[in-house]
Image (cartoon, rainbow, N blue to C red):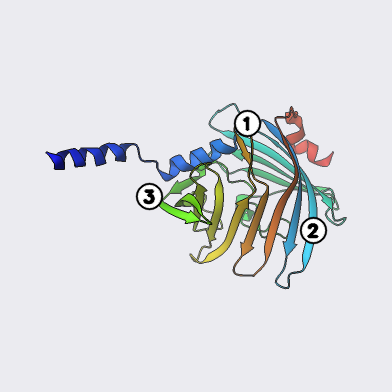
């Protein structure tokens, strides 16, 4: 009788155990609800000799709340400094399942370059972030490990699991994710190349909560193969704005 009860309890608890895909959905939900946003970001490129190149960007984002199963958020990033990249703009229209639409405006050439799926593993403006890294909010773009591990990361209880990009042109064979159990925010990601070797690690910190929306303040991306790194620091960040969707059009890139 006792054995039957124990088996029943284990079965019952298993029915309600969270899965990696459910964790990923909760992570997206924790950063949702911002409506639209404006931010000022400092990106620092650090080479093997610790030389630093600083770039400042203005960014805008528009949350898609239509839940149409196709379109995701839209974002626009514009470089302010240094002078050689000033006016360069990067526009992303995220898709729920399909590949995102991304364009790069190069002011020196007065040309808009479309970032194709084959090029999304390339470096974003000389940084250790790829175009792929800058648009990966949608859980449905990945398959997931069947289970997760309970792991302490810097004293924080986390879920640790793996995800695999469905896009055959992804630059990664897999990613390992660490998610804060309480806040459902990403704390660390390991990126493995096509040879299944560790390529990069990103760390996320300084989360701030406005109402029910978490916003990250600082990101570090370290490349273990070329020994370079890039940091993103949010100097200013405003949400719950009323931005016009026209600002996120391809036509606006040249304005």
Q: Using the image, determine if residue 144 lies above or below residue 249.
A: below
Mark 3 is surrounded, within 10 Å at the Cα level, by few (under 14), some (14 to 19) or many (20 or more) other residues, namely: some
Residue under pointer 3:
147
Residue 216 in percent (x, y) is at 64, 45
Q: Nearer the viewer, mark 3 or mark 1?
A: 1
Q: Residue at x 79, y 58 (%)?
A: 54
The earlier-in-sequence mark between 3 and 1 is 3
The earlier-in-sequence mark between 2 and 3 is 2
Residue under pointer 2:
54
The earlier-in-sequence mark between 1 and 2 is 2
Residue 127 in percent (x, y) is at 70, 59
Residue 94 in percent (x, y) is at 62, 39
**Marks 1 and 2 in Cβ contact (< 8 Å):** no
* 215, 252: nearer the viewer: 215
Residue 44 in percent (x, y) is at 75, 58
Asked whether residue 150 is in view, the answer is yes
Residue under pointer 1:
211
Location of the N terminus by quadrant is top left
Residue furthest toward the left? 1
Q: Residue at x 43, y 48 (%)?
A: 144
Horizontal arrangement in the rendering, residue 73 relative to residue 246 (left or right) = left
**Circle 1 sits in a helix, a strand or a loop, which is it?**
loop
Asked whether residue 132 is in view, the answer is no
Q: Residue at x 62, y 50 (%)?
A: 205
**Marks 2 and 3 in Cβ contact (< 8 Å):** no
């Amino acid at each position: 009788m006792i054995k039957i009860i124990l088996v029943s309890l284990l079965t019952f608890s298993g029915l309600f155990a969270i899965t990696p895909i459910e964790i990923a959905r909760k992570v997206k939900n924790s950063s949702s609800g911002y409506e639209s946003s404006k931010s000022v970001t400092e990106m620092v490129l650090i080479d093997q000799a610790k030389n630093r190149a600083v770039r400042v960007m203005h960014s805008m984002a528009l949350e898609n709340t239509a839940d149409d199963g196709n379109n995701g958020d839209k974002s626009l990033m514009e470089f302010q400094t240094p002078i050689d990249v000033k006016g360069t703009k990067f526009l992303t229209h995220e898709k729920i399942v399909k590949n995102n639409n991304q364009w790069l405006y190069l002011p020196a050439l007065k040309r808009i370059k479309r970032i194709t799926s084959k090029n999304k593993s390339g470096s974003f403006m000389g940084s250790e972030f790829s175009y792929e890294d800058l648009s990966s909010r949608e859980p449905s773009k990945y398959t997931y490990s069947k289970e997760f591990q309970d792991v302490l990361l810097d004293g924080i209880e986390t879920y640790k699991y793996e995800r695999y990009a469905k896009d055959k042109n992804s630059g990664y064979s897999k990613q390992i994710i660490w998610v804060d159990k309480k806040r459902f925010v990403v704390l660390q990601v390991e990126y493995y190349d096509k040879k299944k070797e560790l390529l990069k690690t990103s760390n996320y910190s300084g989360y701030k909560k406005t109402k029910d929306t978490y916003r990250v303040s600082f990101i570090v991306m370290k490349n273990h193969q070329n020994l370079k790194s890039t940091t993103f620091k949010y100097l200013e960040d405003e949400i719950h704005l009323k931005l016009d969707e026209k600002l996120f059009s391809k036509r606006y890139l040249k304005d």
